[in-house]
Image (tube, rainbow, N blue to C red):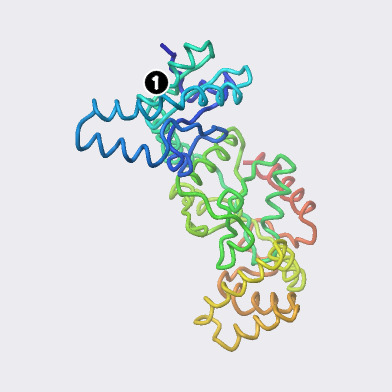
Amino acid sequence: MPKEISFLEISELNPVLIDVRSGREYLADHIPGAFNVPLLNDLERAEVGIVYKQHGASKAKMLALNMVSPKLPEMIETIKGLADGKPVVVYCWRGGLRSYSIASVLSIMGISVFRLEGGYKKFRKQVTQFFEDSVNNVLVVNIHGLAGTGKTEVIRELINLRAPAVDLERLADHRGSVFGHIGLTSQPTQKAFETRLFYALANLTRASCCILECESRRIGKLLLPITLQKAMQSGKNILIYDTLENRARRLVEEYTRSGLETLAQTHQALAGLKDRLGIAKVKSIQNMIQQGNLVEAAKLLLTDYYDPLYKYPNQPSPDYELCINNCNAEETARIICHHLKITLKNN
């Protein structure tokens, strides 16, 4: 009988994780790094569920066995190839029949295999427990600034410097504004986002602080855990600023990396601003973009839409413990690191 292993023990084993849930379950959320080798596909799982409700567990198990049996040899070969000699940890929804059956066959075939105790359900509980308990003790340092000041660039430079920073926009696949989806892939599910965030923050539990770009609770369709938002509200605040010209050029560079598809998405997003900016101004911006006057279009968006919306100062302000003119993201990141090293040491 395959042994069970807890989630906390996985890092010590360095195994290959195999998620035997259906493709839809896997896409909704999974343990990062896990490979999906489904015992039942989405349609098969639904069919087994119907038989279970109408005729009971015995007939549902027999149907599942008939579905799985022809696939077993190929599944075993797939898992052996993925494992490449490493131990295997198999999990399903709650550590039940699906993971037990495939782990048993792997064990018979001489493969070193474990079952994840409690399956995905228990892993998910650990994620939610982390946000309920551990996040309350995190000192958050918020990076504030108007659109185009380069906040995300600074966060990424901080990460390059191995500072305790987390790129929320990268985890959410969204830049947090009406144009935030442009040029990016679709956003993860809420559960998948929380899993990404859990891994990012859990790696910083021994750090003296966590540096984040200041965001509202909503990033696109996703929500930050309420405990993290509260930690951000009570944290330290740093402001970065820059000239309108530099900010506009940053926006153009950021939003035009994906070519014509990006421009089409921009036109669509602009159409949603007609109530706020008026039809004439939206058409004017769209015409500028069509004619290639991208920097001028960005300036107009900044002065008439973004700046009134976010209301951050674009110059030093006594409301922030540190204010930096962000001409160079790497230098700004170094200044922040130096400042935090001194202030946190004194505290």
The residue carrying pointer 1 sits among few (fewer than 14), some (14 to 19) or many (20 or more) residues within 10 Å by Cα, namely many
Name the quarter where the C terminus is drawn. Answer: top right
> In the image shown, does 42 or 238 lie closer to the viewer?
42
Q: From this viewpoint, which residue is outermost toward the bottom?
A: 280
Quickly name the residue at label 1. Answer: 100
Q: Amino acid at mark 1?
A: Tyr
Q: Position of residue 196 (x, y in %)?
A: 54, 42
Q: Would residue 233 appear left or right of 249 to someone viewing this image?
A: left
Q: Is residue 337 above or below residue 56?
A: below
Q: Secondary structure at mark 1?
A: helix
Q: Tell me the quarter of the image containing the N terminus.
A: top left
Residue 41: give x, y in percent of width and height. 42, 37
The answer to whether residue 135 is left or right of residue 85 is left
- Compared with residue 238, is residue 46 higher up or lower down, i.e. above or below? above
Q: Residue at the spot x=43%, y=16% of the render?
A: 104
Frontmost residue, 340 versus 8: 8
Image point (60%, 72%), residue name: 306
Q: Is 97 in front, or is 125?
A: 97
Of residues 311 and 76, the one drawn nearer to the viewer in this rendering: 76
Q: Residue at x 80, y 57 (%)?
A: 328
**Above or below — where is 23 with respect to 311?**
above
Q: Is residue 63 left or right of residue 208?
A: left
